[in-house]
Amino acid sequence: MKNSRLSLILSIAAFLLAVVAVVAVFSSGGHLCDTKGSELAVGLIAACATLIVGFQIYSKVDYKEQINELTQKIEEAEKLQSENKAMQERIKTSESALLANQIIYTADSIYKDMTHYREAAPEYALMKILDAIVPALDAGWKGAAFDVLFNAMDIYITHVGQSGIIEYCKRNGHDSYPVQESVFRYDLDIRTKSKVIQSHANYHDIQKEYEERMFKIENKLAEAREA
């Protein structure tokens, strides 16, 4: 805006000087071809034209510098935004990993707490550790990172049984269920959690290992129905 305004002022000034020069020529004793007057007019007009052209060149150079500066600021802002996004992702990953480890620890505590959970300790521990899989996937765990979790699952699955499932259902307010219904209810709870796990974007990283555990659980539930 400042450059445009200054350019307009210079243009007006140049026009006025040109008018003055022409008037000076025609007012020099009525001689249209007065040499000094002509030289003066030509000199003034040339000076004004040079001044305007020079200023236009300066303005274009100045505009280019401003554009480059603005472009640099935009790139810096985009870089800062990208760094902030990466930091937020790292924080989210750390929080998910912490949550997964906390759940694994809680599941282990439940499994060892035979006083409170009694026969249902493995059943509760298995149900709890399933909750650790989604945050573990959010944290980017894969392969060996899941060893502790899957090894714990194997232990809990091994000890799942009919009496524990019945006790689990009693503690959830279903003490009147027969064996078949208790197993069905426990299986339904597991399948509900499993659907959430299988819908995760990173599920393919653990699909083989997870399905192996689900197969073991199905076998244990089948044994509980027949017992």
Image: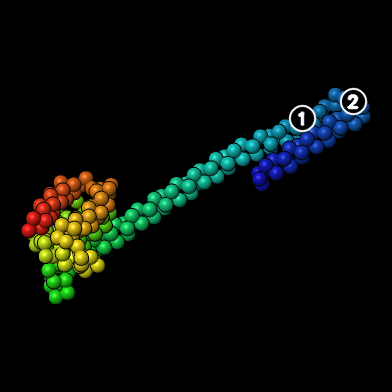
Whichever of callouts 1 and 2 sits on the residue coming sooner in the sequence is: 2
Location of residue 174 with respect to 136 vertically, above or below = below
Coordinates of residue 112 in the picture (x, y in percent): 13, 70
Q: Is residue 127 left or right of residue 66?
A: left
| Residue located 77% across and 30% down the image | 42
The answer to whether one can see residue 130 in this image is no
Residue 8 in which image quadrant: top right
Label 1: element kind:
helix
Q: Nearer the viewer, residue 18 or 135?
A: 135
Coordinates of residue 209 in the picture (x, y in percent): 14, 49
Coordinates of residue 174 in the picture (x, y in percent): 23, 65
Residue position for label 2:
31
Location of residue 112 with respect to 93 vertically, above or below = below
* Amino acid on which disc 1 is placed: Val
Residue position for label 1:
42
Q: Is residue 20 left or right of residue 97?
A: right
Q: Is residue 135 left or right of residue 8?
A: left
